[in-house]
Amino acid sequence: MNFKQRIIDKNIVELYFTDINLNEAKSIEICQNIIKNCTINNEYYFGLYREDGNFNDRNDIEKYRFEIPLLFKTNGEFIDLTLNKFRNKNNFDNRISAVGRLPVNEKTIKVIPIICNYYLETIFFEPKKGWEEFKLAYQSNPLIKAEYLIRNSYTDLIFLHADSGMFFILFNTDKIDLSDVIKKVEKSYYNL
């Protein structure tokens, strides 16, 4: 188990994991356990930024380019926010920015590592605010920071996966006890 803690500000803490690689089976299982142990609600909102395709096989990128939006549309909602922004530009790319929502269930938790590997940056969280409000916030700034979402009461805890391969949990320590999150993380490592 290898995670570190960083204080973002007086009430936001970040845990980041240096030993989770979402291309390895054991890391995927640890990540899925962390997500399960830290989840209490029934829905996730996703902020998805730029196709990256951190896969070993180029065919996987082509496959997931269609399967991931279909998964969201079939089981929740998927909105490509890039379309309006780049409609009249020569460098149009419909894979730059999207939001989605999915129910919290085993199927969703199993595909989260694939979603994280597909996008350059993926954030997801259990919402405290409505879908329309999140969509508007993300549309106005597709690189919205996790801290912003916590400070502005969209959520108390957020998961983030970055292209560097790092997996993060950020949370509001006014609402969630640090020692409880650490216990849930430790439980995730030892319950394999």
Image: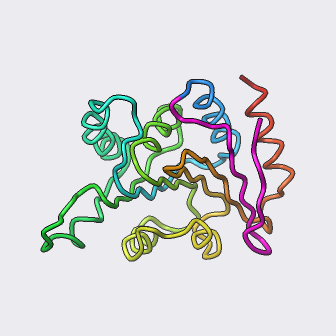
Above/below status of 9 relative to 76: below
Residue drawn at 64 percent across, 38 percent down: 36
Residue 142 horizontal/vertical position (percent): 41, 68
Q: Residue 97 vs residue 12: left or right? A: left
Q: Residue 175 vs residue 35: left or right? A: right
**Quadrant of image for the C terminus:** top right
Q: Residue 71 vs residue 156: left or right? A: left
Residue drawn at 53 percent across, 32 percent down: 106
Residue 143 horizontal/vertical position (percent): 45, 68
Name the residue at the right extreme. 179
Q: Determine if the magenta segment contains residue 167.
A: no
State the colouring used for the structure image: rainbow
Using the rendered view, name the quadrant where residue 177 is placed. Answer: bottom right
61 or 139, which is in the foreground?
61
Residue drawn at 57 percent across, 53 percent down: 160
Total marks in image? 0
Residue drawn at 68 percent across, 45 percent down: 17
Residue 130 horizontal/vertical position (percent): 48, 67
Q: Residue 30 vs residue 66: left or right? A: right
Using the rendered view, name the quadrant where residue 186 is placed. Answer: top right
Above/below status of 174 relative to 181: below
User: Which segment is the magenta one?
Assistant: 1-23
Residue 75 horizontal/vertical position (percent): 37, 42
**Quadrant of image for the N terminus:** top right
Q: Determine if the magenta segment contains residue 2.
A: yes
